């Protein structure tokens, strides 16, 4: 996204006629007060934001008190990239407003090269530390961006899949509240799941 | 640490206040548009107060190159700030989000993580989450013939796994069960392939999911299979690619060796014919498993032993979902063809060994002649086609083969357990599903089946989540 100065009229509250893609810019405001701009198309990848736009609440910018700037910028990157991809397929779709529908639908008509590009973009987006990954999950959940939630949750799952119980406790900062006997009992029940 | 840091951290622990309706607006004169990779120096993260004037307070006039040196490192050289951020972020994950993460793990990992903490153990065991979490083998689906001569469908359920899942193995949700020659054909990763014959020589297919009760009937093949005997139908469905499934109908001439295949793709909704890509003569004889995006079917390869004699050699025929890539994988020799399966990340094959491998103290020449050894092989190196003998056991010592017949059924996907069905040879005897624990070298479970049970016996792992079948509204 180019860093162009916005003018006040870009946030004017024109209702979007259903089915038309608009070039309107939406202002999103992070919890720490930073403003970001996104196309309406990209912003609508968030079902939460989509509803706010449709309800006419987006006129003066949408405050997102749960999403800090660092995360919001990553979310917008994701939406920009995937909205552009969805655009290729949505040319065939009657109602492009439901941009949150299954991502595989978005990828179906994309060429092999575009698919690869999207995959590597997604991979690098979530190649971050655990804390950031958790924050992305929280933001994607709050904003109802299914594709991003799937992506981030899958990354965490891939990271922890082969980890030990102790390592998982460390990652999620969980205290072991089993007594020694209780823990032994659960371990015994699931002994086959541990590396012998 | 100095006071400044402590205060900052304390305020961070407080939940973010709801936004002041009057604020925040972009500060007058400052451009509202920002490149997501912001050019202004980063604020310490996160700031509780949405008031932009406070945010400005933390900003230092740093040069662009110093953007990467975040404020947090300057404040806390020992990185414990990162630790606390991680703790704060992790603690905000709700139960639903933990389940979202767990649902993407393999079954084995989820079982292991029951030991993480009591809340995790309870979360995993909670009935509300059971269907979202990865599944394991619920049991074996089979058919029985009722006294009135009708067919009924059952699940021989492994109780711990099948309980509480509300599975309907009787398939009452399918209108087709009363149709002419309706029967179960295959199960693959939670989907079932069934068939019926509206009239002699015409086969129609249904793919359904007993866990969600969704189903679809496939359109007829453009040109029916010329050979009506020894039909070979297979289902391929990969839950990692849940948007579509494929059904394979192998074509063969009357001498039974395959000439080609018709493949139905649920994505295109059409059948597509391909000629065989094999040079050898192969007869498809057994069941199949989906590995690495390719269907692997047990087949018999006719090999010339000498100029007058032919030998059957069991192979796996592997082909892709388009019917373009074909190959054969040799399997260890057995008395007859065996059972292929996928367990714990490896292709497995079970067959009766040509000669006994285990000799007991009570064996003599006579008993060794009657010996039947189940040999279980594991394909450790797929590319090199190197099978390793993983386990074997004398099934004639487990069952009294003077009184029972048996058939091999399949592998447990997560354990070293092998299933077979044994049935008394006398009229009216009930069959049992038997599971053999390879590690303990003993029977671990015997389930009695309904009277007059018949093949196919299909190991079944339920699927509750996204699937390529239409719902009641046809979506």
Image: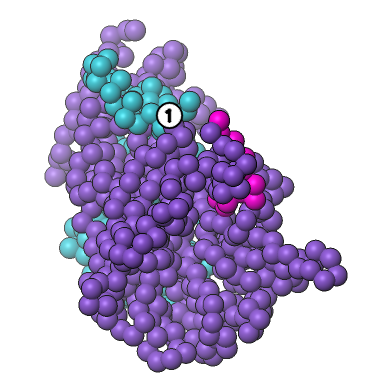
Chain colours: A cyan, B purple
Q: Would residue A27 be found to the left or right of residue A85 on screen? A: left
Q: Position of residue B396 (x, y in %)?
A: 49, 46
Taking depth in this image into account, of B74 and A59 the one nearest to the observer is B74
Which residue, as the protein is rendered here, is positioned at the far right?
Answer: B307
Q: Position of residue A171 (x, y in %)?
A: 38, 27
Residue B348 appears in the picture as rendered? no
Q: Quadrant of residue B197?
A: bottom left
Is B413 within the magenta? no
At x 46%, y 51%, the residue is B401
Residue B393, given in percent of the width and then of the height, sits at 52, 41
Would residue A107 be seen by someone viewing this image from the given angle?
yes
Q: Dominant secondary structure of the magenta stretch?
A: loop
Residue picked out by circle 1: A194
Front-most of B342 and A106?
B342
Residue B475 located left or right of residue B202: left
The answer to whether B169 appears left or right of B281 in the picture is left
Instruction: Name the spot of residue B7 as percent of width and height, x first.
Output: 24, 15
Rendered position, A173 above or below B233? above
Q: Which residue is drawn at 47% across and 28% down?
A: A195
Q: Nearer the viewer, residue A44 or B21?
A: A44
Question: Quarter of the image holding residue B167?
Answer: bottom left
The stretch of residues the image draws in magenta is B344-361
Circle 1 Cα neighbour tier, 10 Å, few/some/many (<14 / 14–19 / ≥20): some
- Locate the C terminus of chain B by quadrant: bottom left
């Amino acid at each position: 996204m180019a860093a162009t100065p916005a003018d006040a009229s870009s946030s004017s509250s024109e209702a979007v006629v259903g089915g038309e893609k608009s070039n309107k810019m939406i202002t999103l405001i992070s919890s720490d007060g930073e403003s970001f701009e996104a196309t309406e198309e990209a912003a609508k990848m968030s079902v939460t934001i989509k509803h706010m736009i449709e309800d006419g609440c987006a006129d003066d910018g949408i405050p997102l008190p749960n999403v800090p700037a660092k995360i919001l910028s990553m979310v917008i990157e994701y939406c920009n990239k995937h909205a552009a991809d969805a655009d290729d397929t949505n040319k065939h779709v009657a109602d492009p407003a439901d941009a949150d529908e299954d991502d595989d639908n978005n990828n179906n008509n994309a060429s092999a090269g575009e698919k690869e590009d999207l995959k590597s973009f997604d991979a690098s987006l979530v190649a971050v530390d655990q804390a950031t990954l958790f924050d992305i999950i929280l933001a994607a959940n709050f904003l109802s961006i299914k594709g991003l939630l799937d992506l981030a949750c899958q990354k965490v799952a891939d990271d922890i899949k082969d980890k030990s119980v102790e390592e998982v406790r460390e990652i999620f900062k969980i205290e072991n509240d089993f007594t020694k006997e209780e823990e032994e009992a659960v371990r015994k029940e699931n002994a086959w799941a541990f590396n012998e | 640490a100095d006071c400044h840091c402590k205060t900052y951290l304390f305020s961070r622990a407080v939940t973010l206040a709801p936004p002041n309706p009057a604020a925040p607006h972009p500060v007058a004169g400052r451009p509202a548009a920002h490149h997501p990779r912001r050019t202004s120096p980063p604020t310490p993260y996160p700031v509780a107060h949405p008031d932009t004037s406070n945010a400005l307070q933390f900003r230092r006039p740093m040069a662009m190159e110093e953007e990467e040196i975040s404020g947090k490192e300057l404040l806390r050289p020992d990185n414990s700030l990162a630790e606390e951020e991680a703790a704060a972020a992790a603690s905000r994950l709700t139960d639903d989000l933990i389940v979202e993460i767990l649902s993407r793990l393999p079954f084995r990992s989820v079982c292991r993580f029951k030991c993480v903490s009591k809340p995790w153990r309870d979360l995993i065991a909670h009935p509300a989450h059971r269907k979202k979490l990865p599944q394991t083998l619920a049991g074996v689906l089979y058919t029985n013939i009722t006294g009135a001569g009708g067919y009924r469908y059952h699940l021989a359920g492994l109780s711990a796994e099948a309980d509480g899942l509300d599975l309907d193995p009787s398939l009452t949700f399918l209108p087709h069960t009363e149709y002419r020659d309706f029967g179960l054909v295959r199960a693959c990763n939670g989907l079932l392939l069934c068939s019926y014959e509206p009239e002699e020589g015409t086969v129609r297919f249904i793919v359904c999911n007993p866990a969600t009760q969704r189903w679809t009937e496939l359109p007829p093949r453009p040109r029916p299979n010329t050979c009506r005997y020894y039909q070979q139908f297979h289902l391929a469905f990969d839950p990692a690619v849940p948007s579509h499934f494929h059904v394979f109908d192998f074509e063969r001439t009357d001498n039974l060796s395959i000439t080609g295949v018709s493949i139905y793709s649920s994505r295109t909704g059409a059948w597509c014919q391909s000629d065989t890509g094999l040079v050898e003569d192969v007869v498809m004889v057994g069941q199949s498993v989906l590995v690495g995006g390719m269907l692997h079917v047990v087949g018999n390869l006719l090999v010339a032993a000498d100029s007058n004699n032919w030998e059957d050699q069991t192979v796996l025929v592997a082909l892709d979902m388009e019917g373009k890539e074909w190959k054969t994988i040799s399997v260890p020799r057995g008395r007859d063809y065996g059972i292929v399966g996928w367990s714990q990340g490896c292709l497995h094959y079970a067959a009766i060994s040509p000669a006994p491998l285990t000799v007991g103290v009570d064996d003599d020449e006579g008993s060794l002649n009657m010996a039947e050894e189940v040999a279980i092989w594991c394909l450790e190196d797929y590319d090199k086609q190197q099978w390793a003998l993983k386990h074997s056991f004398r099934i004639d010592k487990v069952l009294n083969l003077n009184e029972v017949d048996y058939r091999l059924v399949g592998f447990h996907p997560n354990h070293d357990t092998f299933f077979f069905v044994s049935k008394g040879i006398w009229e009216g005897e009930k069959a049992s599903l038997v599971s053999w624990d390879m590690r303990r070298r003993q029977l671990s479970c015997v389930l009695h089946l309904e009277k007059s049970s018949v093949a196919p016996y299909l190991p079944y792992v339920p699927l509750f989540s996204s699937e390529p079948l239409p719902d009641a509204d046809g979506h």
